[in-house]
Amino acid sequence: MSVESEKVIIFDTTLRDGEQSPGATMTIEEKLDVARQLARLNVDVIEAGFPAASPGDLAAVRQIAVELEGPIVCGLARTVAGDIDRCWEAVRNAARPRIHTFIGTSDIHLEHKLRMTREQALRTARDMVAYARSLCVDVEFSPEDAGRADPEYLYQVLEAVIESGATTLNIPDTTGYCMPDEFGALIKGIRENVRGIDKCIISVHCHNDLGVATANSLMAVRQGARQVECTVNGIGERAGNAALEEIVMALRTRPSEFGCHTDVVTEQIHFTSQMVSRYTNFRIQPNKAIVGANAFAHESGIHQAGVLRNRMTYEIMTPESVGLGQSTLVLGKHSGRNAFRAHVAALGYELTDAQADQVFARFKELSDKKKVVGDADIEVLIEDELYHPEEIYRLEQVQITCGDHSIPTATVRLSGPDGEMQDADLGTGPVDAVYRAINRIVQEKNELIEFTVQSVTEGIDAVGRVIIRIQAEVPSSDGGTRVRVYSGRGADTDILVASAKAYITALNKLLAARRQPSNTGKAPAVTG
Ligand code: KIV
Ligand code: ZN
């Protein structure tokens, strides 16, 4: 890194904007785990949630704030005193708290969402930033939909909030509308025309509706932005947000282009990406930059020959730099407990003795069926054994008969709040039969909206992973009901067993939500 290199602050919003995407809901435990991992990744700011959205969000942000020591912990709030109070309540015990408050600034938001004049919105922004600043020294302000706002008006709003004490000014392209040169020009205009801007950090927050969120963010860095808001794997509202791994690796791979660096420990990228995918049940597309399964794979003969001679022929960064390919041991049926634990630790998992024993038992079962057990198999075993939401029901046994001349029939045995129960049903196919049999026991109305089967590794003996999403009505905080999506995943060499496990995981999330309505009903979505 050259002496002149300037630091770009990495503001991670996986737990707020990322978690806002339909079906990405995480439990508090999962959010805490992601927050701890983000701290290992060494991001500068974690936006941990939107505390006014629900008591559950507030509790999650508060726990993250209390526990984490390194990064700034930030909460989101509308420019409404009640939101700001709840945000402060959630982050105040953090070692370094931040309040992030926002209001729409494009005419379309003012007229149709807020029903406010430009003057009213400006006054609200100014007053609420001052209020937030009376509570917290670190206040970030976002003029929502800045990408479609009138720049002259934007300058006025930004000047007003600087006078009120905002320390970071975040410019969101909320709808992913801007093109890179346009967005770069917007940042340049702000830098040149807003009085007092030199006292603040300029931040950017780009959505990916036209596929240019990373390009827009990088253009903004060129024009002086020194904070980038992003999410792991680029998850987020609609087409998502700028992907953290893309921003960080672009700055690291092309230092002379930007003259900037981040403090992210890039070797933690792969592990973080896998964790977020696991908890949200959002698969990563194989060709996804940096974290896709094929991002460092070379298929064609010409490419392979080149890479064998010199990796730089087709690789602009090493797999090791993002945390891939560090373990060289191959595990099989004769591998012992210690070799297994060392391998799991090299993959980045910190397991207790009891957890290691539990996963080792599964590994032994698998290695009886499969000659070579790869890293992908081990990761799937760990997630299947250890990463469950609260287990209200547990699958004890499932038995299925099916075939071209028989009626698919399933018998399941579950342990649940009333002890062990078993039931059976017929279905149009074996998965349908399993789900119907489970429904007879659990009796929670829902609709299956997604069912995906995936093979974890190649070969006939591969472990299958099933991801499902169910949709159901749950009570909302306003006393009514709202439809929410819950995901589940299961893994096994038998995909019908994996399907049953996936369904039970999703049902457990739904049941937890129905039992604690105040902890799960989100406030109306107010932002991207
Ligand atoms: O997309 C957006 O405008 C947001 C703001 C709250 C920063 O998420
Ligand atoms: Zn957003």
Image (tube, helix red, strand yellow):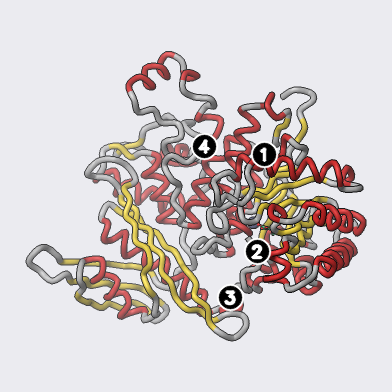
The residue sitting at the bottom extreme is: 479
Look at discs 3 and 2 and give the one toward the viewer: 2
* Residue position marked by numbered label 1 in the rendering: 181
Q: CA distance from mark 1 to mark 3?
A: 40 Å
Question: Which of the two discs, 1 and 3, labels the residue nearer the N terminus?
Answer: 1
* Label 1 Cα crowd, 10 Å radius (few <14 / some 14-19 / many 20+): few
Q: CA distance from mark 1 to mark 4?
A: 24 Å
Q: Residue at x 85, y 41 (%)?
A: 192
Amino acid identity at mark 3: Gly
Q: Which mark is residue 527?
A: 2
> Which residue occupies the foreground of this view, 237 or 433?
237
- Look at the picture and state if 81 lies above or below 156: below
The residue sitting at the top extreme is: 309
User: Residue 520: x and y, percent?
Assistant: 57, 73
Question: Which of the two discs, 3 and 2, labels the residue nearer the N terminus?
Answer: 3
> Which residue occupies the foreground of this view, 407 or 417?
407
